Amino acid sequence: MNWTNLFRISLKAIANNKTRAFLTMLGIIIGVAAVITMIAIGQGAKQSIQKEISSMGSNIIMIHPGGDRRGGVRLSADEMQTLKTEDYEALRNECIYLTALSPNVSASGQLVSGNNNYPASVNGVGTEYLDIRQLNIEDGEMFTEHDVRTSAKVCVIGKTIVDNLFPDGRDPIGETIRINQVPLRVIGILESKGYNSMGMDQDEIVLAPYTTVMKRLLAVTYLQGIFASAISEDMTSYATDEIEDILRRQHRLKEDEADDFMIRSQQELSEMMDTTTNILTTLLACIAGISLLVGGIGIMNIMYVSVTERTKEIGLRMSVGARGVDILMQFLIEAILISITGGIIGIIIGGTICACINWLANWPVAIQTWSVVLSFAVCTVTGVFFGWYPAKKAAALDPIDALRYE
Amino acid sequence: MKKVIELQNIRRDFIVGDETVHALRGVSFDIHEGEFVTIMGASGSGKSTMLNILGCLDTPTSGEYLLDGIPVKSMSKSQRAVLRNRKIGFVFQNYNLLPKSTAIENVELPLMYNDEVGSSERRSRAVEALKAVGLGDRLNHKSNQMSGGQMQRVAIARALVNNPAVILADEATGNLDTRTSFEILVLLQRLHAEGRTIIFVTHNPDIASYSSRNIRLRDGHIIEDKVNTDILSAEKTLAALPASEDD
Ligand SMILES: Nc1ncnc2c1ncn2[C@@H]1O[C@H](COP(=O)(O)OP(=O)(O)O)[C@@H](O)[C@H]1O
Ligand SMILES: [Mg+2]
């Protein structure tokens, strides 16, 4: 078989049937572009949410008092008080999968500075809290271990607190603010983090040594929680196992007793968010799948009808000596050329639409290789199959029957 | 002289619904190299059916057909396609040219399916064939820009280009006016004079006297087969025709 001639014949046939080629390509272009765009939007949303979650500290582990229970059952006073400073110290001394660890107690009240006041809560934390939450000091400094040991009356505040307590633009560093009559000296200001994806103001924050909050503000001996950072995301599950072992030992729990504390990792949170975004992606993928199907049916129709229309041409070619395989190859090459060209144009258009959406609407998009490959493959295979199948039937006819075909 | 065609008791039945149409009821004859045969008969007598079998476009229900000594019946579809490509030039009543294609593209078509002919040879042979039918100056005219006579010339050039053992023409002048018909006849007579074998199907009995042998069909039988010794010259007849208005 002479491939050069077959290619020449196919190209000529495509050129002679431009409308048909265009319509077939259109089906493929729409299918491919729709799939690429929809999946890119879904995955873009997913990735941006994930990014936000990990910006909270992707290795973060949160320990809370009380067993793992569901529904609106209130914890009893006993259960609320199972986490102690000793637990924190034991974790601090023994854990090898953690890089940072901080107790957490918070007291809410009215912050007062001069004539200004603002309702907020003071977070009692350790010095490593900044690493865990990925916070940075913009001005001044963080309190020290020494401040923690001496329950120093100092605090570090966020932008929102600064704006509300010091609206006149005065430098807050060195100023004293009061909460529940306790004066705290401002020694540092945190870098702004803005709002998170749940719409919470992350700058409405006051950090003080946990000892200060426990002794001077709350007068309690238990912790409300312990925050930790695993050495890496992969190590999170080792770290939670390790924490569980240590805390069970600390609390002298027997084999058959349930945990009296809860460990939650950022991983779990992001898995939860993944479920939500996956629903979105699935929805978009369904829409894309429908476009692909519609495109496919279009391709099918045009290919099928055109081969039927061209049965006379097939008969004529056979009458001058084209064999069945020659006819089949011609139609196959036509279908492949049309489908692949359409597929490539579809990819280009899909990519362009994604870029436009990202640029104009500022939506996050993430083009997925698999969606490009899949949609391209589906459309090309449909195009090629429905170009090939009716051609095969036509090529099996006697030339005279094909010529007579109406 | 060498036998180009041998037909032995050819039958062709068509099943239409639950009826069987016997288009050919046992036809036998030989055709030798260099003959110009006209096959005549009323409409429906089986002329086209026979020519399609001769052209390997259709297969007989029974009987044997040897083309250039090769038995066609036992051949596969592909082998018959190659046979059509190398040994047969077929001219249809309705031309059957590729639409939207130029004269040269149409004439090149049979050679496109012949691996032994390269692209430069293909081109030169197509040009030669078009020159032979008097269309040397219309190589790049599209088929829809040509008159019926010109289209039929292109079809004849296409039938010539593969240098076939036999040229088959089914009512090749059926769609043409008298003058153009004679122009085509002149062309066929010239090809005959060059030694080509031609089988020409027509229902017009006047044309018989321009060929070397006449076969007459009726209801799928041969009712007459005679050699014509007194061949008229189509060229002379054409010259005697009154000039047509539009020329
Ligand atoms: N494909 C076919 N199916 C059914 N009957 C056919 C077919 N082709 C030809 N015939 C029948 O065979 C007979 C001969 O037809 P044909 O060879 O076309 O005659 P001619 O060319 O002499 O006018 C006619 O009766 C015609 O109806
Ligand atoms: Mg006929």
Image: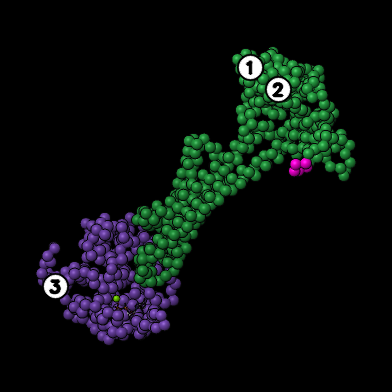
Chain colours: A green, B purple
Name the residue located 38 percent from the left edge and 63 percent from the top edge: A309
Question: Which of the two discs, 2 and 1, labels the residue nearer the N terminus?
Answer: 2
| The residue carrying mark 1 has its beta carbon less than 8 Å from ligand 1 | no
Specify whether residue B197 is in view: no
What x and y, as percent, mark residue B151?
25, 63
Q: Nearer the viewer, mark 2 or mark 3?
A: 2
Name the residue located 16 percent from the left edge and 76 percent from the top edge: B232
What x and y, as percent, mark residue A290?
52, 53
Asked if the residue under mark 1 is in contact with the one under mark 2, i.e. CB atoms within 8 Å, the reply is no
Specify whether residue A290 is in view: yes
Query: Mark 3: few, some, or many residues within 10 Å (few <14, many ≥20)?
Result: few
- Tell me the SS state at disc 3: helix
The span picked out in magenta is A69-73
Please check whether the numbered discs 2 and 3 fall on a single chain: no
Ligand 2 is found in which quarter of the picture?
Answer: bottom left
Name the residue located 24 percent from the left edge and 78 percent from the top edge: B203
Q: Which residue in the structure is indicated by mark 2? A: A110
**Whole-number angstrom distance, CA of label 2 to CA of label 1:** 15 Å
Label 1 lies in what chain?
A: A
Label 3 lies in what chain?
A: B
Picture disc at residue B237: 3
Q: Nearer the viewer, residue B38 or A301?
A: A301
- Tell me the SS state at disc 1: loop
Amino acid type shown at disc 2: Gln
What x and y, as percent, mark residue A166?
63, 17
Name the residue located 32 percent from the left edge and 83 percent from the top edge: B220
Q: Which residue in the structure is indicated by mark 1? A: A166
**Whole-number angstrom distance, CA of label 1 to CA of label 3:** 118 Å
Asked if the residue under mark 3 is in contact with the one under mark 2, i.e. CB atoms within 8 Å, the reply is no
Whether residue A272 is situated above or below residue A298 in the rendered picture: above
Q: Main secondary structure of the magenta part?
A: loop
Amino acid type shown at disc 3: Thr
